[in-house]
């Protein structure tokens, strides 16, 4: 429990929910690092949603859908999707074709803590409802994985970050993350 993520109450809740869903009362061996913890949490939610919608767990529908949502967020250079846009996007994914009740599936992603629904400031006095991936580090991990997979060449990783590169805006100017 010395991992820094455990000092974040939301992350701790997500992790404990994952343990509870799996029927565990202690942390399994090998669950160190953010990757293992995220994988564990997604597996536990996938198990519950797959069972509810009579889907095979091995299809890993939750993992695939969350990954696709992270791709959308990354491509839009945003940290959320408008609620109606996210709903339409999720229910139209090929991965969701086998789901009988698509609106309920989308709602399950929210109620199971994968997505968080909130109001976002659109303009000065105008708000819009949207969803974002629960826990910022979880979202950052998924978005970064997508960006690396999509834009970074394994033999020339620096090129994506050079001026004119697809990821240059991440490290340059007012948009800089670091």
Image: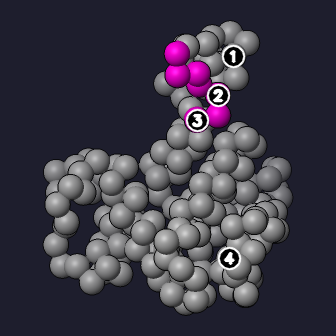
Give the residue at mark 2. Answer: 151
Q: Earlier in the sequence, mark 2 or mark 4?
A: 4
Q: Residue furthest top?
A: 163
**Residue segment shown in magenta:** 149-155
Q: Circle 3 is placed at which residue position?
A: 149
Q: What percent of the width, then of the height, locates residue 166? A: 70, 23
- State yes or no: discs 1 and 2 in contact (Cβ < 8 Å): yes
Figure quadrant of the N terminus: bottom left
Q: Are marks 3 and 1 in contact (CB under 8 Å)?
A: no
Horizontal arrangement in the rendering, residue 39 relative to residue 111 (left or right): left
Q: Which is in the foreground here, disc 3 or disc 1? A: 3
**Of marks 3 and 1, which one's residue comes earlier in the chain?**
3
Q: CA distance from mark 4 to mark 1?
A: 35 Å
Q: Is residue 141 left or right of residue 172?
A: left
Q: Residue at x 33, y 67 (%)?
A: 15
Mark 1 crowdedness (10 Å alpha carbons): few <14, some 14-19, many ≥20: few
User: Count of labels shown?
Assistant: 4
């Amino acid at each position: 429990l010395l991992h820094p993520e455990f000092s974040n109450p939301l992350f701790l809740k997500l992790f404990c929910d994952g343990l509870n869903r799996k029927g565990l009362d202690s942390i399994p061996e090998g669950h160190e690092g953010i990757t293992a913890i995220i994988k564990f949490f997604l597996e536990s939610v996938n198990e519950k949603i797959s069972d509810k919608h009579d889907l095979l767990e091995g299809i890993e529908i939750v993992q695939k859908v969350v990954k696709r949502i992270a791709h959308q967020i990354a491509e839009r250079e945003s940290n959320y999707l408008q609620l109606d846009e996210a709903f339409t996007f999720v229910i139209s994914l090929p991965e969701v074709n086998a789901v009988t009740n698509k609106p309920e599936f989308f709602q399950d992603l929210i109620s199971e803590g994968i997505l968080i629904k909130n109001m976002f400031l659109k303009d000065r006095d105008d708000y819009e409802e949207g969803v974002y991936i629960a826990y910022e580090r979880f979202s950052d991990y998924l978005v970064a994985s997508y960006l690396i997979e999509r834009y970074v060449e394994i033999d020339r990783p620096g090129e994506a970050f050079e001026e004119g590169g697809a990821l240059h805006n991440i490290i340059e100017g007012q948009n800089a993350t670091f």
